[in-house]
Image (cartoon, grey):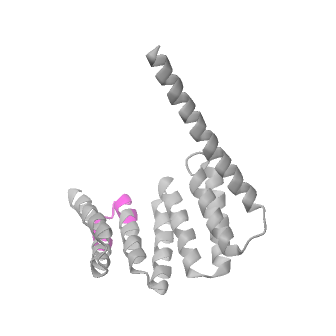
């Protein structure tokens, strides 16, 4: 009886969580049909892409592509970075590391324009990961050390630690 009770509790908890997530997704899809500024629409499309990346990858890519098109139309580096990062993440998830590398480089270019050192460090790290996934360990090492250099300059200890960890991964290979 105790096992059955626990199993039922777990099942109901899972169903309740799934229902809440589906309701949130439905609400955001409905919100997409309303009138809103393009900048808000870019953020919403990226959020929808993130929410569907594991349940409906095709739909997630459609949202990402729409966000990317709109961000490029806005020509605002902040929104371009968000869209490029999202697209690169999806491409990495699908194993297309060369294409992900292109979008991570575009993200870096725009973060340099914005002069956001924390994001520049993240971009270097992402580019390093792309090279690592491609088996290009010398390039990966270079970008991980650049990430560490920038993170050290702005005293971002989290990014410093991530970069050092990734340098260690390269040496492991």
Q: Is residue 78 magenta?
A: no
User: From where the camera sits, is residue 95 visible?
Assistant: no
* Residue 98 x %, y %: 46, 64
Q: Main secondary structure of the magenta part?
A: helix
Residue at the (66%, 52%) spot, across then down: 59
* Residue 164 x %, y %: 24, 66
Q: Is residue 136 above or below residue 145?
A: above
Residue at the (22%, 61%) spot, across then down: 168
User: From where the camera sits, is residue 46 visible?
Assistant: yes
Q: Is residue 124 above or below residue 8?
A: below
Q: How many marks?
A: 0
Residue at the (38%, 60%) spot, across then down: 134
Residue sitting farthest toward the top: 1
Does 115 sit left or right of 31 as displayed?
A: left
* Residue 57 x %, y %: 60, 50
Q: Is residue 124 above or below residue 7?
A: below
Span of residues in magenta: 130-143
Does 125 sit left or right of 110 as displayed?
A: left
Between 52 and 99, the residue placed more toward the observer is 52
Quadrant where the C terminus is found in the figure: bottom left
Q: Is residue 133 magenta?
A: yes
Q: Is residue 72 above or below residue 136?
A: below
* Residue 21 x %, y %: 61, 46
Between 19 and 56, the residue placed more toward the observer is 19
**Based on the displayed image, in which of its 4 quarters is residue 71 positioned?**
bottom right
Residue at the (57%, 40%) spot, across then down: 17
Between 6 and 42, the residue placed more toward the observer is 6
């Amino acid at each position: 009886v105790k096992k059955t009770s626990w199993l039922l509790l777990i099942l109901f908890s899972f169903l309740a969580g799934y229902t809440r997530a589906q309701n949130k997704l439905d609400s955001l899809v409905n919100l997409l049909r309303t009138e809103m500024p393009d900048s808000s629409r870019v953020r919403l499309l990226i959020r929808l892409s993130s929410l569907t990346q594991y349940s409906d990858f095709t739909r997630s890519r459609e949202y990402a592509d729409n966000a990317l098109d709109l961000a490029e139309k806005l020509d605002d580096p902040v929104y371009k970075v968000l869209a490029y990062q999202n697209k690169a993440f999806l491409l990495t998830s699908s194993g297309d590391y060369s294409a992900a590398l292109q979008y991570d480089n575009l993200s870096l270019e725009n973060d340099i324009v914005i002069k956001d050192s924390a994001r520049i460090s993240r971009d270097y790290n992402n580019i390093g990961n792309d090279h690592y996934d491609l088996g290009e360990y010398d390039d990966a090492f270079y970008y991980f050390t650049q990430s560490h250099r920038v993170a050290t300059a702005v005293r971002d200890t989290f990014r410093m630690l991530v970069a050092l960890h990734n340098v260690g991964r390269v040496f492991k290979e």
